[in-house]
Every structure is written in C-alpha cells, then in structure tokens.
Amino acid sequence: MSEEDPASDDPDATSDNGFESVVADIHERIEPSADERERLRAVADRLVARAEAAATDRCPDADIIQAGSTARNTWVSGDRDIDIFVRFPPDLEREQLERYGLEVGHETLPDGHEEYAEHPYVKGTVEGFDIDVVPCFRLESATEIRSAVDRTPFHTQYLEARLDDDLADDVRLTKQFLKGIGAYGSDLRTRGFSGYLTELLVVEYGGFRNLLEAAANWHPQVELDPENHGRETFHDPLVVIDPTDPERNVAAVCSPENVARLQHYARSFLETPRVEVFEPAAPEPLSESELRTHLERRGTTPVAVRFEAPDLVEDQLYPQLQKSVDGIATGLDDRGFDIFRATTMADDTAVIFVELAVSERPAIEGHRGPPIHVRSHAEGFYDAYADDPEAYGPFIAGDRYVTERPREFTTAREFLASDRLFDVGLGAHVETALENEYEVLVGEEITALLEEFGPELGRYFEPHP
Amino acid sequence: MSEEDPASDDPDATSDNGFESVVADIHERIEPSADERERLRAVADRLVARAEAAATDRCPDADIIQAGSTARNTWVSGDRDIDIFVRFPPDLEREQLERYGLEVGHETLPDGHEEYAEHPYVKGTVEGFDIDVVPCFRLESATEIRSAVDRTPFHTQYLEARLDDDLADDVRLTKQFLKGIGAYGSDLRTRGFSGYLTELLVVEYGGFRNLLEAAANWHPQVELDPENHGRETFHDPLVVIDPTDPERNVAAVCSPENVARLQHYARSFLETPRVEVFEPAAPEPLSESELRTHLERRGTTPVAVRFEAPDLVEDQLYPQLQKSVDGIATGLDDRGFDIFRATTMADDTAVIFVELAVSERPAIEGHRGPPIHVRSHAEGFYDAYADDPEAYGPFIAGDRYVTERPREFTTAREFLASDRLFDVGLGAHVETALENEYEVLVGEEITALLEEFGPELGRYFEPHP
C-alpha cells in the first residue's frame, strides 16, 4: 500500500477515518519543544566536551560519540536519557579501558556512581537528565565487537544516515504507540521492542503508518534484513538482522505475545484511530469486593506462593520469577492440579500466582506398570504391590499391570507447603528466598495480596490484549 | 524347554514343586467318566443317525459331521454341547440349503427351536445335552467357504489328525486353566481363547506345560503359523494363522488383556502350582458397607448411567455396551471430568459405570482462538468475544487470542443428565434404550446398584489380574 497513491482501493489509505488528525495530535504531545531540545543540547554539549577533554588527556586517540535517541532526535518528549560513549582505540588493554572509562565518567559526572553492564560505567543526573558515560572500543566493523556496548556507536551511525526529520517524527510516534500498548522495551520483564528495533522497523517500512499496515498482515516468522547480509537461522517470530552485524537478530528478545500485540493494535488502530491507544493503561487496583466477585464468578482456585523479593535488578529478577512460575505450574500439573493461568508479581514481596481449575484430587492414583511381556520388570512390579494393603491391584489393563495406590498430595496446598516444591525448576535466588521463608495462600486468602498488588491483580482478572 | 530333558538347568522343568500332582488332580476332576462318555456317545450317535436319514432323504449327496470338542474327545467333564454339521454339496442353492437345514434340524430335534447365526439352524436339548444341528456346504478347501460355519468341519478334520490321547488330556487341562483365569471363550463379552484356538496352541507347543512355559516368555506380537502358509498382516497381540485358512487369525478376538492374563498366570502357576487357578473365581457380592468403605478410601466419584438392558444376545450387547462406555468416558473426559476407570454391567438393567478422579470443574473455561496472524479468523474471534459480558478477554497468550467463558457443564452429573450425552458414540440399541429412559447415579447413590450388581461391583473394587 503506497501512501503516494490516493486512488488506491484500499480503505485504510483513502478513507478519512481520523488517522491523520489523531497522529497529528499525538505528534504534538510527544515532540520535544524547542526549549526542551535546547536544554538537552546544552547539557549534552557540555558533558561531551568534558568527557572529551578527560578522555584525550588519558589517551590522545580517544573520541566521544553521543548515542541513543537523544542523539538521533528520536526521543519522545519527557525522555531524559543521554548516552555518552567514550571510544578508545582497540589496542588498549581491556583493564586500561575500564580504568580510563571510570575516570572519564567521574570527571564528567562528579556526582555519578558506578554501575556494571559488560564494562563498568558511570551513571549520574545533571539538570534532570539521566546520563550514562560508557567506555567502548572503536572498531572498524561491528562484527569485531568485544562486548555489546561496542556495537552502539555503529547503530547510531547507521541510523543517523537514514533518519530524516519525517522518519524521526514517525519513530517517536511508533515508540509512543508501543509504550501505549505495553510492548516497548527490551528489558526482560517486558520482552518488547527496543528503541533500536523500533527505529529500524520505521526506516525499513518507511514510516509509522506503513509499519502498522505491514504488521497488521504479518505472518510470523517475519524476517527483515536491511543490509541483506544475514546468514544465521533464527526461531523468533520477528527477525530483524542487525544492519551492523549479520549474526544478530535485533528482535531476539521480543516475545510472541508482543509481536501479536503489535499486530492486534495495528489492525485496531487502522480501523479506529484513537489517541487512547498511545496512552499506557495504568490499571486500577482491584478492590476486595471486585476480587471476591471474580473468584465467585470463575469458580477456580487461585494459589499463591509469596516470599521476600530477591534483591536483584529487574532483568535478573523477572527471568527467575518466570522460570519459577513455570516450574511450580509444571509441578502442580504433574500432580493432577490442572492449571488455568499463571503469573508473577514483584515489589517488596514476590508472588508466584497460579490459578487452578482443579485443586483437589482423589486419595488414590492409578500407577501403570511395565508391559507384562517384559518379564523381569513385570514380575518386579507385581511382587512390589501384590501384598501392599494400601494398593488396589495389581490388575491388568491392556498389556500392562496397573495398581492404584495412595496419592502423595490430594490438595495443591499440601504440595506447595511440602519440600517437594523444591524439586521443581526454580530460579536460583527464588529458591534461596523460599528456603528462607514463604507463605501459601489458597482461594480467598489471596485477598491478602491486594494491598501490595492491587493493580497486578486487576490486570490479571481483567485481561486485555 | 523340553520335558524330555530332565537334566536341564531350568528350575521349572526339574524342581518338583508339585506341578505334576496338581495337574493329575485337575485331570482327574475334569476328565469325563466312562459313563459320561458313553451317555454322550449314545445320544450323539442316535442324533447323527437321525440327521443323516433326514438329510439324505432330501439330498442323497448330503453327509453328517460331528464337530466341536465332544467330537474330538477334548471336552471337559460337564460340558454338554453336541454340534452336528449337516453338509450339503456346494452346488445347492443357498435358500435350498437353509430350508433343508431347518427341516433336518426339526426332524432331528422335534422339540428344538430355530436360531440364527450366519445360516438359520435348529437348537434343542436331548437328555441334558445341548444340541446344535447346523447346515453347511461341503467344500474342497476352507478357503472356499461361504460362511463361518462351513469352516468348522475342516477344523475338526485338522485336529482329529493331530490330537492323540495325551494331547487331548492337555487340551482339557488348558481349557480348564483358561476357564479358571477367566480367559476362556471367544464370545464378545470375554474376548478370550476359543476352544479351537486352545487346541491349536496345545498341538503347536506340544502340551499344557510347554504352552505355559512358552506363554510365560511371550513377547507379543506372537505369531504361530502351523501350516506356514500365512500371507496377511495382523495387528493382534497373538496371531495364530488358521491351518485351514491362510487369511484368518484364529486369535483375532483375543484381547491384549487376555493374552497378558495367560502370561501372568502361566508364570504364577509354574512358580507355584495350585489347584485354585483352575477354579473360576465367583466374586462375592460387595456389601453396602464394603462399598462405602471403598468409596471413602478412594475419594473418587463414581457415576453410573442405568437403563433397561436392550434385548440382545451377549455377542451383540457387550460390544454395544463397550462402545457406549468408551463414548461416554470420552464425552466426560473432553469436558474435563478426568476418568479413573470404567466398566459396564448388564442383567435386567444395564449400567455404564465410570469412576471419576475429577467430577467438578470451574464455572469458566479457557477458549483458545486462532493465531493472531491469521487475520480474518483472528478478527472474527476477537469481534465475537470483545463485547461479551460473560467472557473474560480476549487477551493474548503466545501468538493467539484466548478468551475465558462460561463452561457448559460444571459437574459430571449435569452432562450425563443432558441431551449432549447423545452426541457421544453410543451403541445403537443403547441409544434407543437411553432415549426411552435412564437414571444417573453419582457418588454414594451407586449403592442402589448393589442389589443387581453386587458381584460385578466386587470385581470392580477388588480387582485382580
């Protein structure tokens, strides 16, 4: 669909359903004002100059690159991140680079503090802006990189060459759209679209509307390779080969849900443009009576394992919570407690939350033995159970012995409260936290979660795409 | 293992664990006495002569063959079946054969009545013996047969040539063994070993003990082909190619359970020979307090659909009951009511009996929609549920829409009492009976079955191989 062709039959392109006016409205809201730009520019220039002086003092061959959306004029009004990359020549020892990097960082940001990504770096706040001063190697090509941060300057160079003012506007719109639908950010809690990915998609499709129209009709696996140099096979629903690195899928972290979410909202917005889609939903906390009404209406049995939240950054915490909820759900399911849905929540405490369709089982379970023709196993099985006063059988079903014996857990609560909980796959820090102490809540007892997790429970019990 | 080799290391063959004395004891019990033989012979000879006269009156080329175990001296004392086959030349019209057959039958058995297998035939009782007079065609070879009864004379000829007195004794023992373990009879209720199959197995393995030793080590699929002429592929656990018909598996009706049952008891009897194995267990009827104790101990929920038993012979009734219990169990399972075990019972009433591990479900169920990238289906699904006040969602899970909506049946009883019961696969006569009237019993209500089905419930709740 070409926007240059107003005679097209496509209704999206020709009907005036308010698309342009909604977009203009949002554009107005999110474009940084001249004043905001000027303030940012002033701060950035000052800090870049400071960083450059500090860097070349130590290594005459060093230089500075400003990276990220504020460098590329693709930031959304209110974003406050300034990324300053200090590039050192590749023959510098890594230890030397790290030392110089921190020294430059502290000279640039006297009130900053050190953080650690792949290299240590210095982070600080200046006039309300969040500044990172990050050391990296200056390489000929992104394929030579030694750590992820070395790649960033290449991304900036690639995009700077391709983003004109119109496309920069559309990047801003797209970012705000993705924020609105909850799919923006490549952190491991969101598993959505990173800024770089968003910019590549806008460049590749030639704008916000073209991207939406394409996404509305995506048939994953969708593969884009702007430089036509990809040579790896990926299994992600969306594959965007990094123009600066043929072996990397920029969308690797993007979950199937978020790809589907973009498709859903692309269709829905093209059909009915509205500003609300750009506004992140802040779910109302659920009230106790609302929660009780949901539980009664659903007739399910929610169970929650609650413990002190491990002291981890979100990118470490959420994968561990996800692994733990998967493990506990599998442990419940293996014991016959059918899963309806599950989620995790984290604040001061963390919660593994599983909604069960079946939370009680009979006192016995069937236990299928070996085929009778496997003589030694079959005889061993028969002898083990023939005189067991607790067991029914063995009898024969099909070509096997079967016996019925007492079940280890007849309620989900018994399992969750038992040591067998630790047999399932748990995140390491979650396991440690559980070993310390945890609480099991069943059914209406989960109302105790409302104080800390009202909005999360709202999102769970009032789900939308 | 050869019985001719007493020096063998095999403990079964060498240790005197009482095998021979138990077998001698049983042999004593089941061998027809001289008096019993004589009475049978007298009756059979008289009826054969009568049938021969009646047949040759109508068709000079007709002759008579006595078939079955009483003809082959392999009957167990107390068996009272005499089968008289009236053979007509193959050029006779089928209608003529049927008319002659019935006339000969009535002349042979003046008090007899007509029954219908593949041809009509006459059945009657003479001096306590059950007599069948069955017309068939006299063919050159069993492969030319026009109906199953034409095959019988060939079976008799084949076995008469191979059964000496010792093997005939062992056939009797084997039949009594199979009766004792509940695996004798090729009727469609038992689905066990027919008399002909039993005789072939004894002939093929060379005796009772050799058969047990072989069966103890069978690895199904077991294939025997005495005449080495089989050319079909069968999928049954036991395949015995009919020596008189290369396309027929004599053991086709034999269920995997009964093959496994023979293996189990062969091992158990060789290990510990005892006369009880030869004695069919007549299960004690369960008392009401015993039944209540079982239900309490098991914690399961039995459900029963009870109706007037269709007026069918067992070979028609039991397959229909089996189809119906499979269909109803599937219908329950599809709706989330997990099955523990199931069975059927029939007398004046018939019962589809299913023991459930889960008999209640939540008020809602998850409903997985199409993948979001299948645009028209996905949009249709979304539009169908987006404004449904009864439904939760649609939301996104993986690459699909999911919604949660009210479940049609939250208890097994509701489903069994509903018209949807008729959507499952039911035997035709069972369906008719249910359309007329049925009763649903749940949990302790099944105590109402005790009066009619005490032994069947005993067998169900106290299962053995």
Image (cartoon, coloured by chain):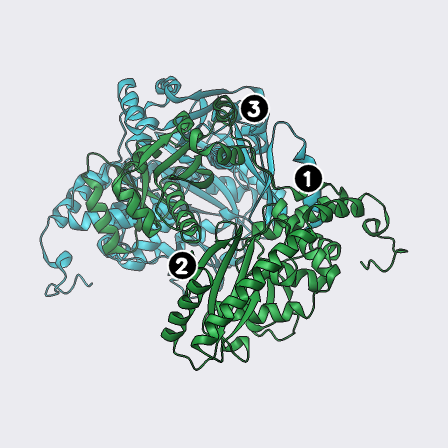
Chain colours: A cyan, B green
Across and down, in percent, residue A444 comes to: 36, 19
**Closer mark to the observer between disc 3 and disc 1:** 1
Q: On the same chain: label 3 and label 1?
A: no
Is B321 on the left-hand or right-hand side of B194?
Answer: left
Where residue A346 sits, quadrant-wise, is: top left
Residue tagged by mark 2?
B115
Q: Are marks 2 and 3 in contact (CB under 8 Å)?
A: no
Residue occupying image coordinates x 44% and y 68%: B104
Name the disc covering residue B276, or none: 1
Residue tagged by mark 3?
A418
Across and down, in percent, residue A459 comes to: 31, 31
Q: Give me the C-alpha separation between circle 2 and circle 3.
A: 65 Å
Mark 1 neighbour class, 10 Å CA radius: few under 14, some 14 to 19, many 20 or more: some
Position above or below: A265 against B241: above
Residue occupying image coordinates x 46% and y 41%: B343
- Image mark 3: chain: A
Q: Quick one: SS at disc 2?
A: strand
Across and down, in percent, residue A331 comes to: 52, 34
Q: Amino acid at mark 1?
A: Glu
User: In this rendering, does residue A205 appear at all?
Assistant: yes
Q: Amino acid at mark 3?
A: Ser
Q: Are marks 3 and 1 in contact (CB under 8 Å)?
A: no
Q: Amino acid at mark 2?
A: Glu
Dot 2 or dot 1, earlier in sequence = 2
Where residue B374 sits, quadrant-wise, is: bottom left
Closer to us: A142 or B254: B254
Residue occupying image coordinates x 33% and y 54%: A201
- Image mark 1: chain: B
Position above or below: B297 against B199: above
Q: On the same chain: label 2 and label 3?
A: no
